[in-house]
Amino acid sequence: MAATLELMEVSVTFGGVAALSRVDLAIEEGELLALIGPNGSGKTTLLNAVSGQVRLAAGQIWYAGRRIDHLPAYQRSRLGIGRAFQQVNLFPGLSVAENLRLPVAARLGLGWRVWREAGGYPEVNRAVDDLLREFGLQDKAGVAVGSLAHGEKRVLDVAVALALRPRLLLLDEPTAGMAVEEVPRIAELIRHVHEKTGITVVVIEHRIDVVKALAERIVVLYDGRVLAAGTPASIMADKKVQEVYLGGLYAQRD
Amino acid sequence: MKKRGRLFWTAVSVLVLAGLVVFPTMWAPVWLLSLAGQIMAFALFAMSFDLLFGYAGVISFGQAAFWGIGGYAVAIASRAGGGAIATLLLGAVAGILLAAALGLVEGFILSRVKAGYFAMVTLAISQILLLLASSQNLRPLTGGSDGLNVYVPRFLLVGPATYYLLFAVLVLSFVVLYRFVRSPAGLVWRGMRENESRIESLGYNVLAYKVAVNVVAGMFAAVAGMLYMLVIQIATPELFGLSNSLDALLMVIIGGAGTLVGPVVGAVILVLAEHELSSIGSSVPFLSHWLILFGLMFILIVMAAPRGLMGTLDKIRDSI
Amino acid sequence: METFLTLLFSGLSTAALYYLLAAGLSLSFGLLRVLNFAHGAVFVWGGYTGMFVYQLTHSLALAVLAGTLLGGALGWVLERTLLRPAYGNIVVQVLTTLGAFYVLSEAIKIPFGPDQVGVGVPAFLHGAWMLRGVAVVKVNVLLVSVGLLVWGLGLVWLTRTRLGLIVRAGIDNPEMVMALGIPIRRVFTAVFAAGAALAALGGVLAGQYFGALSPDMGLQNMLNAFIVVVVGGLGSYNGTAVGALLVGLIGAFASYYLPSQIVGAVNVLIMALVLIFRPEGLFGEKEVVV
């Protein structure tokens, strides 16, 4: 299959320091790809470059046959690139239902309607109800997001990203800060969404068990460069990866 | 429980509205109608600011720019036409368009800068308008620092006619603004207040929404300035002054930001207090500096009860 | 040529005045991330204090000292009461400092009245020297010298002293400085008070420069200082100096050819252009957007 997202020699610098240098990466339609690497290796920057939060110093990004690196973030979102952030990134003063209504209204192009009440569009309400049910949040619809538990916020965060029905979903450490017992819920959710809708998913993840269980392919970033890419098994066996990322632990065990 | 609360508030609103419609037919001394008129003009002004500040989360210290544009548009038109209704309406339309144009320009700056900057830019712009209005070179147009008298059409001077006109415009504006803030676009504005970057990543064009909210708020503020002219009948450069922008801010903060009703309550409290304090002030010298009390009260409310009166009432009601 | 030089000198002296006001604004924004809307009121309080002390003592040095000290004290109180409880909350800080501006501007009217008052100027500052047809106003020389002195001392302080080093590091990366165990909060208070003291010093000198003071001159001067800071780049030390020179000189030349009200509009226009085309200012560093 053809690549749906392609990064060509992408470089990003912050105040003279290279965060990404000449990264080449092609991601195929429908793939579930995990991005791993030590802190500061440029994982989040790579997602930001794709979704439009940072500008490139050099290189090109192509998505679905279009060059997108000069588009503002909102236009990339409209092309079907959905994004969930590392920190919970919601609208704390709004209710859970309103948090979901925003992306649904964006997808249906209702954002400039100024007369009818936001809760009075049946097609929006249906979609919001479906999402609430699918993500197990139906009891929380009217609750202000600020008062949700952390795990629920993370779930809602993913739900907001998915409410746009993206064709490409970028997840930045969806399990960060979660209690151990909550982790399987999110991992299961990601697998479920990927299998059901067939969308392309790129996920940054620190928990190796989650990565091995989820990903079809792993890309390892190190120091702003792609160190290795391949199936989970081949990555675990890669000497370079063992050295810089997995540390001596794996190497000794082998 | 919730339903009964709603019924109660509906009943209160209907009673208040009915009272406001009926009372001038029974008892309408000029001073009272004038005071009520000032309250209504400021209520609309504060509502326009609430749209900007309370809903979209934009801090501006120059909302008086629009208030003054509306005021001067009506004043200049009323002089040109000697109080003829056609020129007055023409002036009103011109004023609204001018306000929209200024809102557009400011909106583009708003989309480029951070929160505090915009407050500063808008303050500077309103200050420039104040200087222009009091400028000697523009005296033929604006009357310089003496200002301009407003010729009000004769039919508005009959009994409570002005009162009813203002009341109608205020209620109509309230309904329109209420629909705006409850609509999908209103939801986007509130989302912008809560988390601007996420709104953008959902595919909303933040620049356009910022420009739009500044334009709409500016147009309503201009209308409020026009209403004010019908009541006080003189346009002075002070319309553009910081104290008016601050009044709007204070009314919104006292009443509760992001509630639309709050600013109206804030306007009632503040205009009445200014009225009372300035009349007491002539006999009690210390109270002639009541502006200081307002400033202190403003600081205290911002620090202690940022949700304002209506917001705090809501919170108390929620907890009961 | 004579006109040009006269305008140049007059522009330099307004630049010096703007600089005194803008330096504190810029520094406290760079370090504390606070836009201080009470700055203009401190300027006015400094001016009136200087006027009052000069009336009593007929000593300009004492007037300058008293005004500056009062400004520093006001800054200290403002930082402790209004800013400290709200670091990180820009909305609250902007609103409360504006409230403080309002209260202070009104309060100055209680002892001194709402109208313009004349300021006593010592005899040695009266008049001007004539140098080949160019008028060099004595007060202007004082302003420019003080402006240069403050700029130079500030530069030495920032680059040569430990506190200056901490301030510069804090502007670059406040978290890092805090992680090093430096009591950054106390540094915040000191920097803010110093900025306020400079504004008050500017007020005393403004009284000498205009020969008069009025309670509402704070707003206009504060706005001009803001414009200077925006043009130069918030938090950039030399940027502020260059911004002050630019705005002061453009103002001086514009006021020769244009009516005075338009000059204020020219300043706002400059600011709007800078904000639209280079929002970080001419010398400000672009912030990393994430």
Image (tube, rainbow, N blue to C red):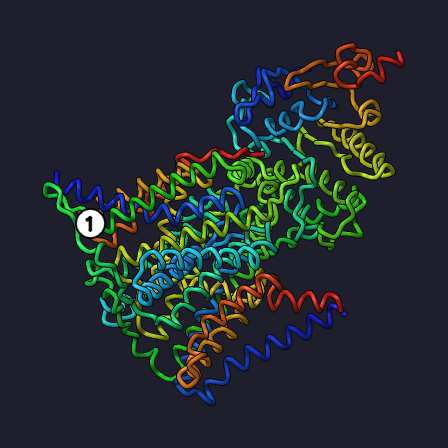
Where residue A63 sits in the image (x, y, percent)?
59, 23
Does B132 sit left or right of B17 as displayed?
left
Where residue B145 sits in the image (x, y, percent)?
25, 66
Note whether residue C147 is visible.
yes
* Picture layout, residue A203 above or below residue C136: above
Observer-nearest of B8 and C33? C33
Where residue A204 sits in the image (x, y, percent)?
72, 27
Q: Which residue is mark 1?
A: C137
* Picture layout, residue C182 above or below residue B17: above
Where residue A99 sits in the image (x, y, percent)?
67, 47
Seen from this angle, which residue lies furthest top?
A239
* Picture layout, residue A88 above or below residue B75: above
> Hey, which quadrant is residue C68 in on the image?
bottom left
Observer-nearest of C189 and A166? C189
| Chain letter for mark 1 | C
* Picture layout, residue B74 above or below residue C27: below
Which quarter of the rendered picture does the N terminus of chain C lie within?
top left
Observer-nearest of B76 and C93? C93
Indicate the amino acid at tag 1.
Val
Q: Residue at x 56, y 30 (%)?
A: A54
Q: Residue at x 40, y 47 (%)?
A: C22
Note whether residue B97 is visible.
no
Which quarter of the rendered picture does the C terminus of chain C lie within?
top right
Does C259 sit left or right of A170 as displayed?
left
How many labels sit on residues?
Answer: 1
Q: Residue at x 78, y 34 (%)?
A: A175
Does C122 sit left or right of B36 as displayed?
left
Crowd class of label 1 (few under 14; some 14 to 19; many from 20; radius 10 Å): some
Q: Under tag 1, what secondary structure?
A: strand
